[in-house]
Amino acid sequence: MAQNILIVGGVALGSKAACRFKRLEPESHVTIIDQDMYISYGGCGIPFYVSGDVSDVHDLRKTSFHMLRDEVFFKNCKDIDIMTETRAEKIDRENKLLHIRRKDGSTDTLAYDQLVLGTGSSPRRLPIPGVDLPMVYTAANLRDAEAIKEVVTKGQVERAVIIGGGFIGLEMAEALADMWEVETTVVEYCDQIMPGFVSSMFARMAQGQMEEHGVHFYVDEEVKAIEGTDTVTAVVTNKRRLEADLVIMSVGAVPNSDLARDAGLEIGKTGAILVDEHLRTTDPLIYAGGDCAQIPNLVTGQPAYFPLGSMANRQGRVIGTNLAGGNAKFKGAVGSFVVKTFEAALAGAGLSLSSALKAGFDAISVQVAQLDRAHFYPDKGMMYLELVVEKETRRILGIQGFGEQGDAVVGRINTVAAFLEDRPTVDRLSNVELAYSPPFSSAMDILNALGNTAENLLDGRYRPIDVDGFAEKWSSNGDGQCLVLDCRARQDGEPFAQKYPERWINIPQDELRQRFKEIPPGKKLILVCNTGVRSYEAQLNLKEMGLDDPVSVQGGMVTLNKCGLDL
Amino acid sequence: MAQNILIVGGVALGSKAACRFKRLEPESHVTIIDQDMYISYGGCGIPFYVSGDVSDVHDLRKTSFHMLRDEVFFKNCKDIDIMTETRAEKIDRENKLLHIRRKDGSTDTLAYDQLVLGTGSSPRRLPIPGVDLPMVYTAANLRDAEAIKEVVTKGQVERAVIIGGGFIGLEMAEALADMWEVETTVVEYCDQIMPGFVSSMFARMAQGQMEEHGVHFYVDEEVKAIEGTDTVTAVVTNKRRLEADLVIMSVGAVPNSDLARDAGLEIGKTGAILVDEHLRTTDPLIYAGGDCAQIPNLVTGQPAYFPLGSMANRQGRVIGTNLAGGNAKFKGAVGSFVVKTFEAALAGAGLSLSSALKAGFDAISVQVAQLDRAHFYPDKGMMYLELVVEKETRRILGIQGFGEQGDAVVGRINTVAAFLEDRPTVDRLSNVELAYSPPFSSAMDILNALGNTAENLLDGRYRPIDVDGFAEKWSSNGDGQCLVLDCRARQDGEPFAQKYPERWINIPQDELRQRFKEIPPGKKLILVCNTGVRSYEAQLNLKEMGLDDPVSVQGGMVTLNKCGLDL
């Protein structure tokens, strides 16, 4: 029997659910109601429209075959009705009616057999003075995108301040600084960018990468007010005043769950709508998904909130199937992510060390630096990976990576994301079978090496120190208790030994057995080499010779350098 | 108690096993015996040395930190003894002795507590006249590599014939044609290149890519003889005579299992040494791995042979652990692979359709063409994927892919390879959670689309036809029974309709409901669009209107074009 399906919200989830359902039940009737004038667009593309990578904002509304996904497209191609600039005001669940209000103020009630809520999210706005000033944007919809692009292309922006160093903040900073040479400053409340998502090592690397391209950063700094009268003139933090003629606030998203809440549907602890694995709300005739719904984090098993376009698309298909009587499931997410930072990419899946500890895991992490393909192949690049592991069970909780060959980084992260929900242990990573050929990987790929290194750490053979640990020991080394033992070849290590005669010695790993006696006794040794391979070998050599406590710098000198340590 | 470990063969497996073991048991003694003068080199790099990507052959012998992995390196860095140019002649298992013969003819017996066989493989040589002529090489070791490079750099090679269109054949063909502008011809015995590994669609694509760069191909052709007196002058097939002054024979590898067989160790049905999941042979004191050992194919569960450097490295580590009393396992392989073909890459994991059918699976496959990142992002490229599925169980048996952004293709293949051993079903792929951002993926990534398409096929909604099927119908269409219904926009489809007025009509998918009556009755309809999305939609539209039997061209026009169909 033909059904009448109403869908509230038509950006990602709603339109996907509608299209999938119509392919399964062409005889049924589907109407999408959206408060905006634009539907079915790629909101994640906004920074790339602002940057100029995408020249026309309407390209974000087109299919890959260049058709504009507007009302006419949905009617002719999909036989789906669209009502734009129309608000869904109230759900009358008892009578299965949706109350709507059009732009002209007229109201109506629409009957449904099943209803889908794809109401999305709203950008969070800080409760500070000045947030409503002109030239303060959130970059959350196409109208914002058009407005921002217009002012930058007209040369009206000399200085921009981005509030928030998360995904959108970094992407918008790159867009403004790269293409438009706007003096761009990112202010982040936490003590690093991408807080919760990556370790301080990666935050240092990504920030350094962006600083090289002229973006300024102030982390651990709280925005107190936005100043201006007719328009924005400055952003005031607890530490300074930053002149600005454009402000972009990217401090997270808040699920639009009011419509559901008012209808008596249960709301999850994240503030998003509670749904089961079929993406049904607590009313079996009402589905919800995308930015307004709460789903499980498959690593923690806890309720989570992942406002991401890819998630919404996959969920939309699940809902479309289930509207047609199917039994599709969406079990949750491991939280895969990637953000481009100029020529590099920062990506991850699962938990960072800090988020794992926060979630109650007894977790540790291990970091590896290695080339992303055979070391003898010319187009290689350095890649940095970190694996987060539960100590007791050796379970992999998450992986993060950074590198200048973005596809190569993302490929490694996706490989782990693919099985993260299965509660893999580190041996799984040691043996993961990547397609091998020198132009694409090493015979022992960095992913395998990451698993192996984690195993060596868990088994107590590998005693690492990370960049923060090194930086602390290095800067507080007034007492001369620490000594860096540089295991690299003479031409690499000797210049450092000469520069820091009291704190640095160079004994190449292959000479360590012979020259063991040159190591001054009573010092706390910090072993370092180029990427960490030889310093690990040296650590084992020294243990054999009775020295149990030297530590090895994870990822070696390339990591210290990439993190901006000035040695 | 300190052990005495002997390792026969020191290229990949042997040296890895030795190093890992020594890190775990530094007090034990390890000796590697190798018949060659070079050990521990990256044999997979040989084509890239010939091509000039790697300038010095000894770079293939170096660590990533530029140390030559020779006898001195192994002694000083690893405390491992190396005996090069020494043959292992016989294993006396009863007395735990290895009989060896040095280059100078002297012999010796060495005692072992545990023994490792890393004897590798030998390149297969066809039993035809002329295989022993000068200038006939197999590109299997560094001396071959040096010899080939020397003659090409000296300009002594105008025409080369490569026998065998597998991995090494294609890589060597690219090396010769690209850098040295040698007139290069590949002759393949089977009816396509990369037989067994990929479908004819991918074989067509990769061959076409290489033909664009001047490489010639003759498939389905048997080499009968190599001609010449002092040196090679020609290769004679069952169909033609090809002049040549260099011949490279790349027709597979044969495991070197004689030493094991003579010692009474069990040999598997593949001809390689039988080992258990700890990589122990039938003698618990003897391990084997790498190119001389047989391991399970994790998709079929059957014994298999995967001579690949990455496999050998991972297995070497497992053996090293077990030599030291560990309990490491190597369960088998799913057969991940990648080969670079000029700017593109051809990759896969698990079974191709033909190998699945051969292994007894009731399998089908589905093909998808989609951009490798957001369609509005500038640096996108087209990617082609094929998924092989068991019909009844919906189990994923394999995936293959081709595209011009190699890392992006390999990343998708690795993502599936990572969970292929878990017997995943297609819904797993529909929901696989790739890191999403427009510069790296689509909101509905091609991998998700591949899973979705497979589901639509298995559920009977999607009725596809592949490039071979289309080519057959197109070329045999003398009776006028078939009609191509082109669902693309007018500007794309109309020129074809004008060119083939009897066989091609253009009705854009969004006009199909209105213009349904224009479709001539009684024809077998073949639906086509750009990539296959609209033709699938059209197929459902037509079904709604009562037409059940139209088929849809998988991957659309971009696939037909990429396969070289001249339309």
Image (cartoon, coloured by chain):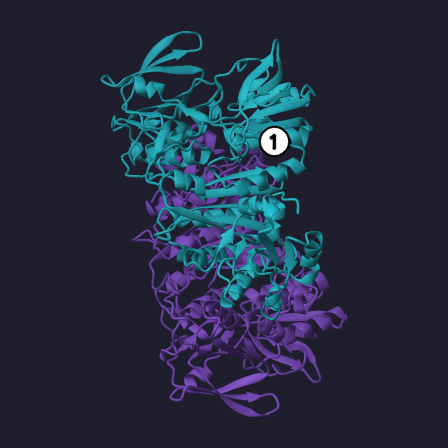
Chain colours: A cyan, B purple
How many numbered marks are there?
1
Q: Position of residue A88 (x, y in %)?
A: 37, 16
- Quick check: B368 left or right of B207? left
Residue nearest the viewer, comparing B482 with B560: B560
How many residues crowd mark 1 within 10 Å: few (<14), some (14–19), many (20+)? many
Can residue B76 be seen by looking at this rendering? yes
Residue B104 drawn above or below residue B504: below
Residue nearest the viewer, comparing A392 with B87: A392
Residue nearest the viewer, comparing A29 with A488: A488
- The single residue placed furthest to the bottom in the displayed view is B106
Regarding mark 1 in the picture, which secondary structure is present there? Answer: strand
- The single residue placed furthest to the right in the displayed view is B154
Q: Quadrant of residue A439?
A: bottom right
Q: Position of residue A310 (x, y in %)?
A: 45, 36
Q: Quadrant of the N terminus of chain A?
A: top left
Can residue B464 be seen by looking at this rendering? no
- The single residue placed furthest to the top in the displayed view is A105
- Label 1 marks a residue whose chain is A
Residue A165 drawn above or below residue A232: below
Q: Position of residue A315 (x, y in %)?
A: 37, 35
Residue A443 drawn above or below residue B127: above
Give the amino acid at mark 1.
Answer: Phe
Residue with the mark numbered 1:
A217
Q: Position of residue B230 (x, y in %)?
A: 71, 84
